[in-house]
Image (spheres, rainbow, N blue to C red):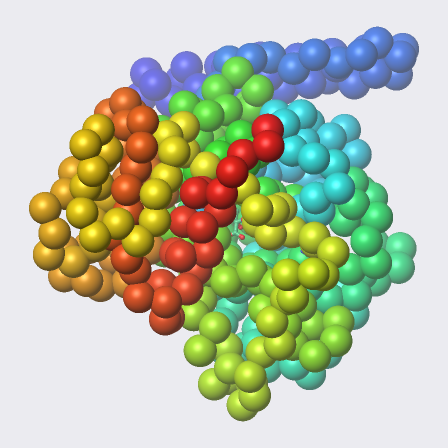
Amino acid sequence: MQGRFCICVSLNLLSQYCKHLDQQQKRGVKPVMPSSLQILPGDDQGLSCAADILREGGLVAFPTETVYGLGADARNDHAVARIFDAKGRPRFNPLIVHVHDAEMAKLYVEWSDTADRLASAFWPGPMTLVLPLRAGTGLSPLVTAELPTLAVRVPAHPVGQALLRAFNGPVAAPSANPSGRISPTSADHVMAGLEGSIDAVVDGGTCDVGLESTILGLTDAPTLLRPGGLPHEAVETALGQPLAQHGDTDAISAPGQLASHYAPGAAVRLNAETRRSGEHLLGFGKVDCDLNLSEAGDLIEAAANLFGHLHSLDNMGAEVIAVSPIPDMGLGRAINDRLRRAAAPRDV
Ligand code: TXA
Ligand code: MG
């Protein structure tokens, strides 16, 4: 009760502060946002506070079934710009717009029969569709990085869904981690990475899927742009045709396509059958290791554990993380994609 009282008092202050910022902005004063982070519960009161912060141009991290997102009102240039600053994200990387249902997605993109078939089969869920951007949507151009397309997603997590319904508008949200680092699958991960640069996090527990959404490009032949939490085999079955693959020589249209991404602090060595001296072993299956993605060799369990275990090994002070071989099928394909990028040489 007392905690809630504190949260609401602080939110009141935040709301007054935001009004003050508006006045400052009108006078041309560069806004500075407060650095104290609100941790909100995923109940009606917490969600209504979170929706108000979004309306006022704040940044709210919230749970989805894949990973936590860092949300801002997708129509508010200043709020969207703050996402890029908070994450240290390159501005050429566009953001996914999150909405609570397909009807709202249709306000922002040119819909198609293929989109309809996939949305009926997999939304709400871990799938993002890239479609032609509709004209005159009022979305901030920062969201699309001036591409003629827009990525849209309807997440399934009950707390994320409830926040989107309470806000009742488009929420631009990348994963809530500093750019290039491991994605967050708990509110603690969000706070460890972004405390001081965002306004609130809605705590909805640990994410079930644990890998970002599968991104499908639908502007041409259906194309797998990023493997993710929905196995590509399921998409191909629903479409009745194989997906085209995003070629390595194509222009980068997703930061997840950058060679180095999803990186822990430690160096990463892949396909490790044994642990070398000084290494921490992230195992899969029945192996002697420091942490196991899934002793039973279950890829769904491994996906859910991947980012959390990488965070934990970093916290254990690992210098090199060796990783057991992971079968390259179903969710294993997305797991291997993330691991390859985590192991890649880092330019930044
Ligand atoms: O599961 C997820 O997708 C999570 C949760 C929070 O929804 N979000 C997420 O966002 O992973 P982010 O920004 O970390 O990755 C989204 C990817 C980026 O690689 C971005 O470049 C790509 O989507 N993307 C966004 N708009 C695009 C577009 N118009 N065309 C191609 N790729 C796009
Ligand atoms: Mg990300």
Q: In this view, does 6 lie above or below 190?
A: above
Q: Residue 166: give x, y in percent of width and height.
A: 56, 45
Q: Residue 86: give x, y in percent of width and height.
A: 61, 25
Q: Residue 333: give x, y in percent of width and height.
A: 41, 64
**Residue 52, located in which quarter of the rendered image?**
top right
Query: From the viewer's perspective, is 161 left or right of 99?
Result: left
Query: From the viewer's perspective, is 6 left or right of 114?
Result: left
As rendered, which of 293 and 10 lies closer to the eye?
293
- For the point 53% across and 30% down, the residue is 178
Q: Is residue 289 above or below residue 18?
A: below
- For the point 44% across and 78% down, the residue is 234
Q: Residue 317: give x, y in percent of width and height.
A: 28, 23
- For the point 34% across and 18% down, the residue is 3
As rendered, which of 73 and 94 lies closer to the eye?
94
- For the C terminus, which image quadrant? top right
Q: How many labels does the image show?
A: 0
